[in-house]
Amino acid sequence: MPNLYEILSNPIAIGIYIALAIGGSIYKSISRQLKRKKELQLMADSLGFSYDDKQTEKVSELLDSSSMLGNEMFFDVIGGTFNGTHFAIGDFNIMVGSGSKKRKQYQTYVVIHSGKLIAPNFCLQPECALFRMAEGLLNRVTGSFDIDFSTHPAFSENYFLKGSNEDAVRNFFNPRILEYFQTHHGLSVEIFNGTLVFFRLGEWVKPDDIQALINDAMEVHQVLLPQ
């Protein structure tokens, strides 16, 4: 049995060790993804929804309505109709970081279109230190800025809200909507041409939690509907 010094002093042994380590990592990743696909398909069947390993034409139509996701591609897609509302749930590969720290991050989104949502285009995300530091720069460079509400300081503290038509967004975010998000933290919502995109930043949802994700997205959709 060779000791560690003998292995480290042998270039061939080092090469074999590295190849096995990389191969094992790739095998684990593929196995995990195949397991997820199977679990998602079983979950979709149990809920009476469809499952595709890539986005369908209907999903593409939904994504085309979103400025956030229009150029991206869903995979592991669950789709269906819930109380007359069309929706799709799927995963994305998002590259985060830069240089040697660049890595792939998985993110699960819900896209909803009911034809009932009448709202200005806006993007709502949890407030963070980066947004606060970059707010002045964003305002100068892109014209984007955080829309705050003096009547609801807790909402403004917890969320970064932007929209191309500030007056329309302010009018849309009435006290009822502000109070909902004020008590529900960590949600990300985009409305673009009547289509809603819902997610929690950095969350790759487990198959067992898909139903809860649908419920949360539908609840937000209901809150944003005209009363």
Image (cartoon, rainbow, N blue to C red):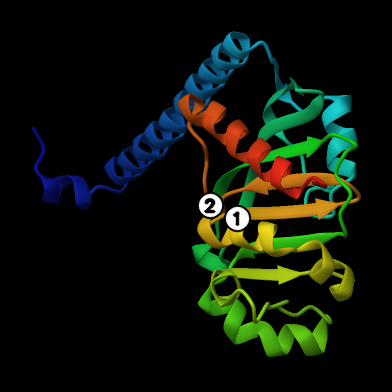
Which circle's residue, 1 or 2, is located before the other in the chain? 1
User: Which of 129/53 is in front?
Assistant: 129
* Residue 139: image location, x then y, percent: 77, 86
Amino acid type, label 1: Tyr
User: Which of 3/134 is in front?
Assistant: 134
Q: Residue at x 52, y 41 (%)?
A: 204
Marker disc for residue 128: none
Q: Residues within 10 Å of mark 2 (few under 14, many from 20)?
A: few
Residue at disc 2, secondary structure: loop
* Residue 167: image location, x then y, percent: 87, 74
* Residue 174: image location, x then y, percent: 74, 63
User: Which of 162/102 is in front?
Assistant: 162
Residue at mark 1 to residue at mark 2: CA–CA distance: 22 Å
User: Which of 217/143 is in front?
Assistant: 217
Q: Residue at x 57, y 9 (%)?
A: 46
Mark 1, residue position: 180
User: The N terminus lies in which quarter of the figure?
Assistant: top left
Residue at disc 1, secondary structure: helix
Q: Closer to us: mark 1 or mark 2?
A: 1
Q: Residues within 10 Å of mark 1 (few under 14, many from 20)?
A: some
Q: Residue at x 72, y 41 (%)?
A: 222
Instruction: Examine the image and state in which quarter residue 89 appears.
Output: top right
Mark 2, residue position: 202
Amino acid type, label 2: Gly
In this rendering, the answer to whether 173 lies above or below 128 is above
* Residue 5: image location, x then y, percent: 12, 51
